[in-house]
Amino acid sequence: MQPELPQAVAVRDRPGQIFLTFLRLGCTSFGGPIAHLGYFRAAFVERRRWLDEATYADIVALCQFLPGPASSQVAVTLGIMRAGMGGGLAAWAGFTLPSAAILILFALGLGRFGHGSGQPGWLHGLTVVAVAVVAQAVWGMMRSLCPDRPRATLMVVAALVMLLWPGALAQVTVLIVGALLGWGFMRGPAVQPVGQLDFGLRRRHALAALLGFFALLLLLPLVATLARSHALDLLARFYRAGALVFGGGHVVLPLLQQAVVPPGWISDGRFLAGYGAAQAVPGPLFTFAAYLGAAMQPGPSGIPGGVLCLVAIYLPSFLLLVGVLPFWDGQRRRTGVQAALRGVNAAVVGLLLAALYSPVWTSAIRGPADFAIALVAFLLLVIWRLPTWLVVILGALAAAL
């Protein structure tokens, strides 16, 4: 007799509910992609119990392997899991809308968001709270995913490698080595994951999405050249950036700089101003594409240009997720895959541990006062179990005083 699926897995939500849930996260998730994973874990594993710790770690590991913005891909995956493709689109829209809107307004000159030495105290307080959020995520995932000596050792080794050899290539290498070590040395009896990940996606649609991913990557530049269309050229350049970057976040910035500055579409000064603003707003750093699309000349620019570039840089992620997710639940139930995932999950915790130091700690903690705020925030999150959004507000107020 098959065990009854837990309510958190079986229940389906409406896309509107998904949108509002992720809109709140899009307004409060400061600190970059690693911090976002901590916010998601607190919201969906601990509070709402949409899924268990191991399933969440499996999703994070899968998204770390795929090119594109890992935290946004996790958000889309959770949305699809709860409400199908409509839920995935709603999760993406809610999570990206706040930062994209702010950056488009910044590009249009309707507002200025602090950057550089002029960063206001409350804004710095949000980055300090991100230290506590990431520390909470590392602590919780370490206890559940690294319970024995081999996995704890792999976690620490992965963290050391990332600290000594930072970069997207090192991240992919660490995950691959973790998978190989898990597959070779961490085998055990097959364990059926809690619940079934029914994404509501058919395999023929998955194959069509994968075909579309590679077709657009290869054909868009050719079509843009033949049509002599600036809009298609923008679409091709931003699509390529989203399709070929591993590590997301800051890793995509050099690709975007090469795409828009040498042709003279935007100056270095305006590019760096937008980069500063992108670091100051909540949500994913990939929304920097919205700023570039709105600020560039010639057109399309303004709101249409911002939307075009934003969609272009995220489209590869959607196609890859639709192409992979229908096969994921079946694969993660295999004994060999589960062993590999044990190694990958331990390596992922090591990546989070390294990121807790750099860039999260090194960019946020500037002195004893910052450390005190982060320590109190960690206490409120882990011991007092206050909601993350409340701790974020309290941290911002404390830093502003």
Image: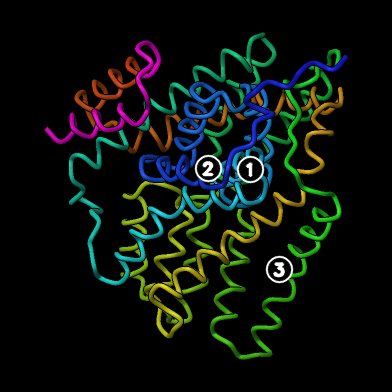
CB of mark 2 within 8 Å of CB of mark 1? yes
Q: Is residue 384 above or below residue 99?
A: above
| Total marks placed | 3
Please provide the residue range marked out in magenta. Answer: 381-401
Residue 18's label in the rendered image is: 2
For marks 2 and 1, the one nearer the N-term is: 2
Query: Where is residue 199 drawn, in percent x and y?
Result: 73, 41
Magenta-highlighted stretch: main secondary structure? Answer: helix
Query: Where is residue 294 drawn, in percent x and y?
Result: 39, 72
Q: Amino acid at mark 3?
A: Leu
Q: Is residue 353 above or below residue 31?
A: above
Q: CA distance from mark 3 to mark 1?
A: 28 Å
Q: In the rendered view, does 68 fall on the left or right side of 366? A: right
Q: Amino acid at mark 1?
A: Ala
Q: Amino acid at mark 2?
A: Ile
Q: Is residue 101 above or below residue 108?
A: above
Query: Where is residue 147 drawn, in percent x and y?
Result: 64, 10
| Few, some or many residues within 10 Å of mark 3 (<14, 14–19, 20+) | some
The residue at 49%/46% (across/down) is: 19
The residue at 44%/65% (across/down) is: 290
Q: CA distance from mark 2 to mark 3?
A: 30 Å
The residue at 50%/53% (across/down) is: 93
* Residue at which label 1 appears: 83
The quarter of the rendered structure image containing the N terminus is: top right
- Which of the 4 quarters of the picture holds residue 188? top right
| Few, some or many residues within 10 Å of mark 2 (<14, 14–19, 20+) | many
Q: In the rendered view, does 3 fall on the left or right side of 65? A: right
CB of mark 2 within 8 Å of CB of mark 3? no
Closer to the camera in the image, 366 or 270: 270
Residue 217's label in the rendered image is: 3
